[in-house]
Image: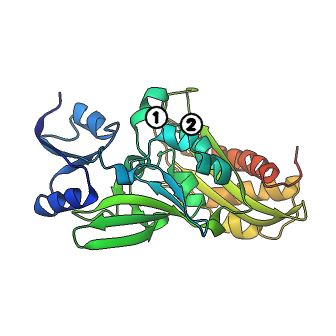
Amino acid sequence: MYNIQGYFEVESVNEATALLAAAPHLLVIAGGTDVLIKMHHGQIEKAELLSIRKIKSLQGVVKLEDGTILIGSLTTFTQIANDPVIKENIPVLAEAALTMGGPQIRNVATIGGNICNGATSADSASTLFALDARLKLQSNQGERVVPIQEFYLGPGKVDLKPGELLTQIIISPENYRGYGGHYIKFSMRKAMDIATLGVAVICKVKQGNILEDVRIGLGVAGPTPLRCPEAEAFARGKTISPETIAEIGKLAVKATQARTSWRASKEYREHLVEELTQRALKAAIVKAGGEAIA
């Protein structure tokens, strides 16, 4: 069932990167909710595992004096959903965290593992895209920071070089201050299911009825999570109205690369993008202090 050839456990980032430099074939495991399933299904064979779950420096959420929020890659979805910094400053991420699996999964699944798995359906990804998150990657040679939109390369493929670990998710204050946000996960079941579509919308409103800024992150609308630049550009400076919101929904579809799968047809996914973008935007407007639109 699990053909594990070797198992190593470390307690610091330096230990981990040193081991990975010497043995880049090691498969990094934290919560194990993705890796162990792949092993169980035979997608990974004869693995040597490197457990990083005991690295305390990669756990938790910190808000710096300048407002930058740092999320350790080993922070679990339960911790994210309950963290006071997240709930106060970026509650839309807490919303997304609560849609991930059931309580048992959320207690062990980490946000870093969710990102590094490279799945377009990752429940954290569309929200982090909308927040313009950056990722800190560390190796034995040093560290680099990349925008999350550049990290996803294709289905299940990410820009994680041999020997690198994702250590932090970075969210700058200008990407959340003054914004309201809302996340919608559409799935065939109410719980414990992979998203058929994930939509995260954050927006900033001025004078109660003007869209100062809108950002739309989509999951399962293409081979990777994505943003909707045409819809976002159209929204800026527009008066909030049913017509404006309807047009934003239509333009969001233009950014998609939806395909037909056993979960949903291409046409149905595009319908969901248009409809759920509007619903999420209406909720985000209210959370940003704007006027409610029926």
Location of the C terminus (image quadrant): top right
Locate residue 266: give its quadrant.
top right
Q: Which residue extends farthest front?
A: 65
Q: Where residue 230 sits in the image (x, y, percent)?
A: 67, 68
| Residue bearing mark 2 | 98
Q: Residue at x 60, y 70 (%)?
A: 66
Image location of residue 51, percent across then percent down: 23, 45
- Determine the residue positioned at 65% across, 69% down: 174
Of residues 135 and 80, which is closer to you in this image?
80
Instruction: Check disc 2 and give the amino acid type.
Output: Leu
Q: Is residue 135 above or below residue 196?
A: below
Residue in view at x 22 percent, y 36 percent? 39
Q: Which mark is residue 106?
A: 1
On the image, the x and y values in percent for residue 154 come to: 38, 58
Tell whether label 1 touches label 2 (CB within 8 Å): yes
Apparent side of residue 221 relative to residue 212 in the rendered image (left or right): left
Q: Is residue 267 above or below residue 159?
A: above
Residue 18 falls in image quadrant: bottom left
First of labels 2, 1 by sequence position? 2
Q: Crowdedness of circle 2 by 10 Å Cα count: few (<14), some, many (20+)?
A: some
Relative to residue 222, is residue 283 drawn left or right? right
Identify the element where label 1 is drawn. helix
